[in-house]
Image (spheres, rainbow, N blue to C red):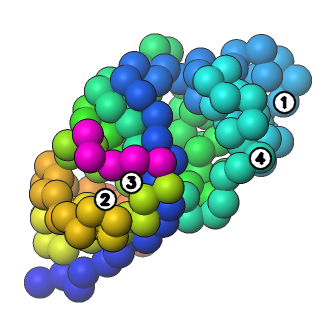
Amino acid sequence: MRTAREITGRARRLGDDVNTDYIISSTRKRDSLDERVLARYLLETLDPEFAASVKPGDILVAGRNFGCGSAMEIAVTVILAAGIRAVVAQSFARTFYRNAINNGLLPVECDTSAIVEGDQLTVRLADTRVEVANVRSATLTAARPLPAFVQEIHARGGLVSYLRSHGGKMEG
């Protein structure tokens, strides 16, 4: 049995269909591909002040189809560079979901309708179970389970680190 892990942070609320060009505008990538530089422009299309208001440990919370659009891996790495370690959404675009796992960003699928901007959240991972606790509403929401190997990839910081620690082989 694996030990439980937790990610705690402030909810940063977004809506449905947040595409990768909203996460980081394609015009910004012309100047730099350094995710630490690009993190200053995170979600600027939706809110020009958003990136400046992000605190390390914040958790993005969205509706349906988060990360839709182009399959830009840099959208995930920019979120990570901003200090965000998890995105909680009702659903994810498939490519974004895989890019998130591969880069160590935790994608959590659950009902987000009761989460509001600023809520204190705790994402709990144990075995394949995932839960989202909301301090304000005193609720615990079950999320879509994550296979143990996906949680292990996340715990290692992404697929490359996971493979290095397992001699280049997938386990589980």
Disc 1 marks a residue whose amino acid type is Ser
Residue 84 x %, y %: 56, 55
- Of labels 2 and 1, earlier in sequence is 1
Disc 3 to disc 4, C-alpha distance: 22 Å
Question: Label 4: which residue?
Answer: 52
- Of labels 4 and 2, earlier in sequence is 4
> Which of pointers 3 and 1 indicates the residue nearer the eye?
3
Disc 2 marks a residue whose amino acid type is Lys
Residue 165 x %, y %: 42, 71
Disc 4 marks a residue whose amino acid type is Ala
In the rendered structure, find residue 87 and report the number of the disc placed on it.
none
Q: In this view, does 42 lie above or below 17?
A: below
Q: Main secondary structure of the magenta part?
A: loop
Question: Label 1: which residue?
Answer: 32
**Label 3 environment density (alpha carbons within 10 Å; few <14, some 14–19, many ≥20):** many
- Of labels 3 and 1, earlier in sequence is 1
Q: Nearer the viewer, residue 123 or 103?
A: 123
Question: Label 2: which residue?
Answer: 169
**Which image quarter: residue 95?**
top left
> Which of pointers 3 and 4 indicates the residue nearer the eye?
4
Region of the chain picked out in magenta, as a range: 113-117
**Please, what secondary structure does the residue beneath circle 3 have?**
strand
Disc 4 to disc 2, C-alpha distance: 40 Å
Q: Is residue 10 left or right of residue 149?
A: right
In percent of the image, x 71 and y 49: which residue is there? 53
